[in-house]
Image (cartoon, rainbow, N blue to C red):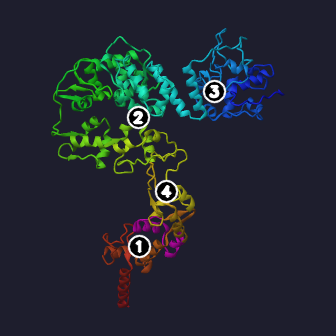
Amino acid sequence: MQLNFIPNARPNESLSGLLIRQASGVYQTPGELLANLGSKCNPPTELRALLRGNKSALKKLWRNSNWEPSPFYSFIAQKRDFNHWVNYNRLGVCPKCASDGLTLESHDFNFIKACTKHSMALSRQCHSCLKPFPVNRPLLTHCRCGEPIRSKAADPAQLEESQYLEALMLENDPQSLFAFKEIQSIMSERLSEKSLTVIDYRNFLEGNVDGVVAAVNNAIRKLPAISLRAICAPFACAKSDVIKLSAPRILSMVERTSAENDMKIKTPEFYLTHDEFRYAIGLKQKTAVVIESTYFDHKHFQGRSGLIFNYNKLSEFFAPLIHGNRCADDTTSSLAALSVSRKQSIAKLLEKIFSNDLPISSFDEKKPLSQIHTLSGTLNSSNTPAGFMTMDSVVAHLDSYEEAIRGARDAGLLPYTHQKSCNNRYLFAIKDVDAFHSKYVLIGELARELQYPPMRLSDRLRELGVVPVAGPYEGNSSVSTFKRADIEDVDLRAAIGITNYATNSGRNAGGTPSFDAETWATGHEVAAQLNVPIAQLHRITRHNLLVKGTPRIRGSQRRHYYRRDSIQNVVALLTDAVEVDHLAKELKANRKKLISRYLYLLKAEPIKVGAKTLIPIDDAKQLRAHYEQFKDASAAADYLSTTRHQIGNWKKASKLSPILKDDPNFIKSPLLYRVSDLDGMRNSTQLIRESRT
């Protein structure tokens, strides 16, 4: 189909409006136009293919058109959740823009509520047929049913929000826009707080969380049966790094007042996802799985991120912990310490709390459930001296893992006492543990609070110059440990925002090399340049010509690298080397026996280069000297002009002895004889023959 009418795109015109104008110019709908062009796809699919640069009928039709999407539109088109942001079957329409024959590009996006040009609310549904406005309609100004599109003046709040979002789109700042929509969704849908203005959200994105904290405190009054950590869980587990980094500040600033004990007030809209609930309880994975299956009946959905914990279930779980009876006593301990002392899991101890068998002394709602203090009575100390803690107690006290504590111990950051006579255990002074916790922070603790992968967080901190005092390449610890003072001074938002950085997991990120490629070469590169199998590079490094080492790369793979400036030395070594076949022929020795003597005597192996088997010239000189001084039974028989059988008889008669084991030239097989001893035997036999004649 040939079209004589190809409209030019107007400034800031939407792609959907351009397609409708193209179709109306030939008196067709967009669907009919695409079908005549040979397309088998519907208009939304064609538009998305055009945005992504894929093969489409529109791309061929508009190859000479001046239309070009904005950078933000192109970025959204590549996302998997494109339909969440742009829905071509439910477009927003401004009647005045449509009458002018121009619909703005921002009107294609679902989050734009008003036309900033005419201050009109975008209409998304026909007032007559009650159906949404799709891209597949004949005219810009009318619905598919024929009714003209109508609208009303925009609300000031909607207009202000649309202006701010359009500014972010114009600046091509998708991260701020996504964070704005996510924090708005959390506050309005989860916490039912719709009083926040665009200024409050903008201040939040700029680092001022006071407005959001005030709204969260107001929402806490409606959520009396849920812990403060659970209420702040949506912030800690948000997709946006901006919100995630603000979560610790929000949690530290929110408070529950005494006027919030009205249990009749409920907010059924509040819920937690699977990851958010695990953050709220703050327990390790195995314990969290038991709690989910016991109290929420999630036995068959363990590890599924699509699980939802509604308000009613959450209130049944948290209410006894928050509003249960409190007992004052001096003998209290946390569930973590009690779990170690009684050798019971935290899940079992929670069951005793819910059955009133274990009274609660205090519960800080901002901390994990492992920090609930109960009336414990006398703890089972397992003969632990006063003022000391065992390894299990330290792990429970710091809410960490044994591997991390062991790494801090081996790095010299945590003093210890080794009791070899008492089950070979390690003891830690309580004052030393508290001092360690106040001075250092483990990467696991930091990652758990930020809800960010620990390895990636450690990589980004290194990129900012925050080097751990102990870690895989700093000390003997396998877990990175940082100074708290260094972490407090660093901008964590800038750290998480880094995209190109050298990783600590052996992979390249953003094309960033994991080591200095100008100085060091990989084993594969050296082997290819020398035409040597990579498995034989260790035979070359023995000669101290090819420098091998592990440079300070950020990789967990213990790979060896080789200095590039030492490769030329190896080339000279291989050029002067002697072939095994030539050397065996020169020494009149068996090839296999020659290699065996080389391996046993010099603790080395020949180097295979292509089809040749080479021995370095210095090693060849030592082998020549050794063959001149020592001979095996066959060579000794030829040297004395006799037989191997006679050599054996002389050995049995102790007339000729091989070299002993304590001799540095000894070889187990074959036995070697000194040439000086053979000369003595030759002289004695010759004297006997002369006397007989």
At 63% from the left edge and 17% from the top edge, which residue is drawn?
Answer: 124
Say which element carries label 2: helix
What's the distance in space between the residues labelled 1 and 4, CA to CA? 32 Å
Label 4 crowd bin: few (<14), some (14–19), many (20+), radius 10 Å: few
The disc label shown at residue 632, or none: 1
- Is residue 562 in view from this perspective? yes
Magenta-highlighted residues: 576-605
Q: Are marks 3 and 4 in contact (CB under 8 Å)?
A: no
In which quadrant will I find the N terminus?
top right
State the residue position of label 3.
106
Q: Nearer the viewer, mark 2 or mark 4?
A: 2
Of the two numbered discs 2 and 3 on the same chain, state the one appearing first in sequence.
3
Q: Is residue 162 magenta?
A: no
Q: Is residue 598 magenta?
A: yes
Q: Nearer the viewer, mark 2 or mark 3?
A: 3
Say which element carries label 3: helix
